[in-house]
Amino acid sequence: MGQSSSSHSPPLPSPAPASTHHRPTTLTSSSSSSRSEMLGFRYSKDELFIDISDSTTSYVDYTSEIPDDCLALVFQFLGSGDRKRCSLVSKRWLLVEGQSRHRLALNAQSEILPFISSMFSRFDSVTKLSLRCDRRSVSIDDNGLILISFRCRKLTRLKLRGCREVTDIGMAALAKNCKELKKFSCGSCMFGAKGMNAFLDNCCSLEELSVKRLRGITDGGTTEPIGPGATAVSLKSIHLKELYNGQLFGPLISGAKKLKTLKLLRCLGDWDRILEQVAVADNCLVEVHLERVQVSDIGLSALSNCSDLEILHIVKTPDCTNSGMMAVAGRCKYLRKLHIDGWKTNRIGHDALMAIAKHSVNLQELVLIGINPSAISLEAIAMNCANLERLALCGSETIADGEISCIASKCVALKKLCIKGCPVSDEGIEAFAWGCPNLIKIKVKKCKNVTGEVGDWLRARRGSLVVNLDVEAEIVDATASESGAQEDLVELPAITNQVDVDADAEAAVGQPEPLASSSSGRGSAFKTRFGVFGGRALVACTFRRWSVGNSSSNGNS
């Protein structure tokens, strides 16, 4: 390996009858002579003979000259399957592959407990570990988690999914043994507030915390609140999802002095008071996601104190109105990304959009779902937000050909556009043959008056423009009324796997979806508690990801 052929290399012996010491192998010759000479092979006109001897100097392991560090670097470019196969080559490769593996995902069933010691004797350099257990299986318990924490003291990232046998005792031991943890995520676990507090009291380097469906935190009055502990000066991101009693995390949220990202998704309870505690004058919040939580204009007004706020998602919060959004737009001058899903309540509309157009001059990404903007407010955004590059308009009854033509003529910086469920026709789409000179992709979905012919025409006019038209979706719409929803609403398929409107909107404008999880483990009690949201007849407007290949996009008609 890495050496040129040489005339001094002794040739391999000629093939001999099989014996206990020689194993001749015959291969059809398909290689060039130069390559054969480099490898030290002797071949005839018809066949290539290779003799592998057990005894003397005929075999040279050129990889033995490669340093372990270089071999480990090569392994880092391989996938998991190739790394496993490489580990079978020799004892040295097995050792180097195990010592160079920093990321490991295990099926955390109770059956692996006897093998934990030997497993982490081989993989002794793991810094990123994922432990997942199916809900139909029994997960590892405290003993397994404690043993793993002893063998992986250098962990920086840990993810627990479905580890229902882990209790407060296991979490306390984990925190004491793995003090270098920077990212921790748990979902569908059963430990409670005591275990979470013990964990936070010892992880002084923790920067990101994600908690989803933590069943051990109940509504009981005796449950202790969860404080920041040792993470008060290090924690930068908190993500809470589908918690019965998420307000117990209030002291943690308000006590994290360097908190930059806060995501509250489908958590029960009133969050206005906690947002008021968080949004103080010296806060560092840059990104806030509020989805299907009980937040009103009081909470939005509190967020307006976050002068450094750049990313804001307001998704299906029916108590938020124009007043709260106007306060945010007026005081948060650095907004770059804004997602609003008004849930077709018409409580956020013209006034809020006018305030956004006036104050959010740095806006680069705007997603409007279930909102009916006026022609005046849409024109104001198109004219004043000169840096707007990504725009998604979904489920609006007031966006027609005139508004689309205005966008085409005035949004000069626009690069990606998505239109879904709006009364737009071919005439409006034709405006992009001349408008939006920087546009690289346009997606139109579930707009019944848009035909495939305009897509072909637009591709012919602008060859570099990716045009994605879903003109067959109207057949699905015609049969969607079986669900009993209101006639004047846009009927779309139900959302599955907990991928909501806001997540789909992120995908449509080119943003990665964070930490997806399966919804199969959600209990019936949890669904009952969220009936206040699920009982509405409003149907979410969703759209697929922008990441569709150019070839497949140009092939649709």
Image (tube, rainbow, N blue to C red):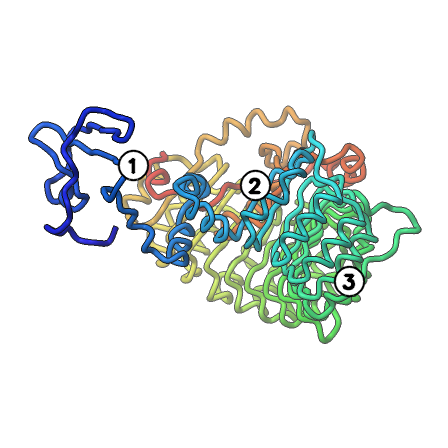
**Residue kind at label 3, given as amino acid type:** Asp
Q: Is 318 located above or below residue 208 in the figure?
A: above
Q: Is residue 440 left or right of residue 304?
A: left
Spatial CA distance of label 3 from label 2 is 41 Å
Comes first in the chain, label 3 or label 2: 3
Between 257 and 526, which is closer to the camera in this rendering?
257
Q: In which quadrant of the rendered image does the C terminus lie?
A: top left
Q: Position of residue 221 (x, y in %)?
A: 92, 50
Residue 542: mark: 2
Spatial CA distance of label 1 from label 2 is 65 Å
Q: Position of residue 471 (x, y in %)?
A: 44, 33
Q: Is mark 1 on a helix, strand or loop?
A: loop
**Residue kind at label 2, given as amino acid type:** Thr
> Dot 1 corresponds to which residue?
54
- In which quadrant of the rendered view does residue 481 lie? top right
Q: In this view, does 226 lie to the left or right of 40?
A: right
CB atoms of marks 3 and 2 within 8 Å: no
Between 53 and 421, which is closer to the camera in this rendering?
53
> Dot 3 corresponds to which residue?
201
Q: Is 414 located above or below residue 80 in the figure?
A: below
Q: Mark 3 or 2, which is nearer the eye?
A: 3
Residue at image x 68%, y 70%? 258
Residue at image x 67%, y 31%? 485
Q: Can residue 275 be seen in this view?
A: no
Between 461 and 222, which is closer to the camera in this rendering?
222
